[in-house]
Image: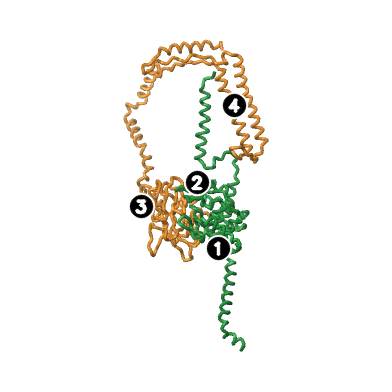
Chain colours: A green, B orange
């Protein structure tokens, strides 16, 4: 006991105790935190990915978004944008942008998925934000297709049209077609709300709801055209144009043939 | 063609006659074009060729009808084929449509080809008959009418005549009365004004997601977020009423922006704000002609109606910034309840949906 009491008064005791306390707090926090973040399901980014991402970002993105991703007068800040935003914007070819405009156009994808992951890792390391989904979250095998249809018509069809073909908005913007969207892109678009699109959080549209919507969009994409020409599935505008020009045109040609005197 | 020489001659006679006629404007009528015989009229070979063409069309049509039957029986309806330009389509639909459509077209085309090439090629003038009836018919009609008038006693029986006229005068009255509620409402029934100024949103009514009916906490909605919402009681009301009438009035949207972005709201005070930390609730029913709108563009805070492009600035009291709508979108005052869920403070304070006569200025 005497020796213990003597050590308690040792000058280093305070420092050691403080360090022990900090370690314990950190360990408990890490344990609790890993539990919650596992629930939100993000993949773990490695240090190399973050480093590679930082380099790629400095080369390809920093001229607009700033070296620290803090944004500028022509580009939004990426602090808090999250890995999901990077994954959506780069994997659809919207970023990097050729020139600022009302809306980023879809172009060819110039980064590999590994490079996209690296940049996502770096942006995710800046501040917490919407995370890319795990493969399990995109598993739609148990999703409710009918519910997906209802949720799609309530939340998505207004802009993206009932057939998922997209539609015009205001000020030169437009809701894009969903025909080429992957489940991962549909998910990341809903959680990040790119461009004009609002954010549909996992609290108001749960992961299950999103899986249903993804399954529904998949069924729209897989739809055959039993009748042939789909006319972009835009509805009465293209159908009317087709009937008035092609249909009526053919009738006029036949009428002329009937009327012309035979030789 | 010799057997139709007689009508041909008639045509020629008419042709000569019309040369002397005058048009209403005083000019001479144009002389008819000289009659040129068709190749089939003069060349028996051409006639036989035309005959072959017509019969070929009819024979091909017959074969196509048989092909239609074969396609109907033989082609599985699930087979999909890819075509250039048109893309993928059902092989069965394509075969059925092509065979039946082409067969019907060939019957028609054959008939027209037959008429143009082989049937008599003569111009015939048919005189228009006189529109006026013959004097005897007219006299007979007048006498029948007069006999009827005398025999029915319409002229002599005054009481019958007057009562009939009275009843005919009153005929439009029921029509006018049933349209009466266009400007007067019966005392015991709700006026259109009352029906349209009240929704099932009440003080403390939980706001739930449309379709999945889940209550919402403020932290569930990120900035830039949009939620399509309905009152929590809507599910039961719809079940009881069996109609979508209450949904049509109560459907709303929640949007969130940073409080600094909100330039103005339609009401609320510092103690009782209408928003919850930047979460605003608006009617989803356009004030123009009632389309449901949720085309919320989160960067500009504008709500765009897909029907007629009315645009509302949700950050500025949802006032109209473009389009035919005459009124802003009504805002729903909201707050949180003791359990932390979003609830309505009250019903809408303005009429929901399209404007109408009785609502007055708002």
In the rendered view, tell whether residue A13 sits above or below residue B204: below
Q: Which label number is shown at residue B106?
A: 4
Q: Position of residue B215 (x, y in %)?
A: 50, 60
Q: Are marks 2 and 4 on the same chain?
A: no
Neighbor class of circle 4 (other Cα within 10 Å; few <14, some 14-19, many 20+) is many
Q: Secondary structure at mark 3?
A: loop
| Mark 4 or 3: the one toward you | 4
| Mark 1 or 3: the one toward you | 1
Q: Secondary structure at mark 2?
A: strand
In the rendered view, tell whether residue B146 sits above or below residue A209: above
| Left or right of B160, for residue B88 | right
On the rendered image, what quadrant is the C terminus of chain A found in? Answer: top right
**What is the CA distance from the residue labelled 2 to the residue labelled 4?**
41 Å
Neighbor class of circle 2 (other Cα within 10 Å; few <14, some 14-19, many 20+) is some
Q: Residue at x 65, y 31 (%)?
A: B67
| Mark 4 or 1: the one toward you | 1
Q: Which label number is shown at residue B362?
A: 3
**What is the CA distance from the residue labelled 3 to the residue labelled 2?**
33 Å
Q: Position of residue A113 (x, y in %)?
A: 60, 54
Q: Chain of mark 3?
A: B
**What is the CA distance from the residue labelled 4 to the residue labelled 3?**
65 Å
Earlier residue among tags 4 and 3: 4
**What is the CA distance from the residue labelled 1 to the residue labelled 2?**
35 Å
Q: Secondary structure at mark 4?
A: helix
Q: Chain of mark 2?
A: A
Q: Position of residue B65 (x, y in %)?
A: 63, 29
């Amino acid at each position: 006991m005497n020796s213990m009491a003597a050590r308690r008064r040792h000058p280093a005791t305070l420092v050691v105790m403080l360090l022990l306390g900090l370690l314990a707090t950190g360990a408990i926090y890490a344990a609790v935190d890993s539990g919650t973040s596992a629930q939100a399901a993000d993949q773990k980014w490695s240090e190399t990915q973050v480093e590679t991402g930082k380099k790629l970002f400095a080369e390809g993105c920093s001229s607009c978004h700033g070296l620290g991703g803090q944004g500028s007068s022509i580009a939004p800040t990426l602090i808090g944008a999250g890995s999901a935003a990077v994954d959506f914007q780069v994997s659809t070819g919207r970023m990097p942008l050729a020139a600022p405009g009302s809306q980023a156009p879809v172009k060819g994808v110039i980064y590999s998925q590994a490079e996209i992951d690296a940049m996502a890792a770096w942006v995710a390391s800046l501040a917490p934000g919407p995370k890319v989904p795990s493969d399990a979250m995109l598993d739609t095998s148990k999703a409710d297709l009918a519910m997906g249809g209802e949720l799609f018509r309530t939340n998505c069809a207004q802009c993206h049209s009932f057939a998922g073909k997209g539609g015009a908005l205001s000020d030169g913007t437009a809701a894009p077609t969903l025909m080429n969207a992957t489940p991962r892109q549909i998910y990341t678009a809903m959680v990040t709300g790119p461009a004009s699109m609002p954010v549909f959080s996992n609290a108001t549209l749960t992961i299950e709801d999103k899986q249903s919507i993804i399954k529904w969009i998949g069924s729209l994409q897989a739809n055959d055209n039993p009748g042939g020409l789909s006319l972009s599935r835009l509805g009465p505008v293209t159908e009317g144009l087709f009937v008035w020009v092609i249909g009526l045109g053919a009738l006029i040609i036949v009428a002329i043939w009937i009327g012309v005197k035979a030789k | 063609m010799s057997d139709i020489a007689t009508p041909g001659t008639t045509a020629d006679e008419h042709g000569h006659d019309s040369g002397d006629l005058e048009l209403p404007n005083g000019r001479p009528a144009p002389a008819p074009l000289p009659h040129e015989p068709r190749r089939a009229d003069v060349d028996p070979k051409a006639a036989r060729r035309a005959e072959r063409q017509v019969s070929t069309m009819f024979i091909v049509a017959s074969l196509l009808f048989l092909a239609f039957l074969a396609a109907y029986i033989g082609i599985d309806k699930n087979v999909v084929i890819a075509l250039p330009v048109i893309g993928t389509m059902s092989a069965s639909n394509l075969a059925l449509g092509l065979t039946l459509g082409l067969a019907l077209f060939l019957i028609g085309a054959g008939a027209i080809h037959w008429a143009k090439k082989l049937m008599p090629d003569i111009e015939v003038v048919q005189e228009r008959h006189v529109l006026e009836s013959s004097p005897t018919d007219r006299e007979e009609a007048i006498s029948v009418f007069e006999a009827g008038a005398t025999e029915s006693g319409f002229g002599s029986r005054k009481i019958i005549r007057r009562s009939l006229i009275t009843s005919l005068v009153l005929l439009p009255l029921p029509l006018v009365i049933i349209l009466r509620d266009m400007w007067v409402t019966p005392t015991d029934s709700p006026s259109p004004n009352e029906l349209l100024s009240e929704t099932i949103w009440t003080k403390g009514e939980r706001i739930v997601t449309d379709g999945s009916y889940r209550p919402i906490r403020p932290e569930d909605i990120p900035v830039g977020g949009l939620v399509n919402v309905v009152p929590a009681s809507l599910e039961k009301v719809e079940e009881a009423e069996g109609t979508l009438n209450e949904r049509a009035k109560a459907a709303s949207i929640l949007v969130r922006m940073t409080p600094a972005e909100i330039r103005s709201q339609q009401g609320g005070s510092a103690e009782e704000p209408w928003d919850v930390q930047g979460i605003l609730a608006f009617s989803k029913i356009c004030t123009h002609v009632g389309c449901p709108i949720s085309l919320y563009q989160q960067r500009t805070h504008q709500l765009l109606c897909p029907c007629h492009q009315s645009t509302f600035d949700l950050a500025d009291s949802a006032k109209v910034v473009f389009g035919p709508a005459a009124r802003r979108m009504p805002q729903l005052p909201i707050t949180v309840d003791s359990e932390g869920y979003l609830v309505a403070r009250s019903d809408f304070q303005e009429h929901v949906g399209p404007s109408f006569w009785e609502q007055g200025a708002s």
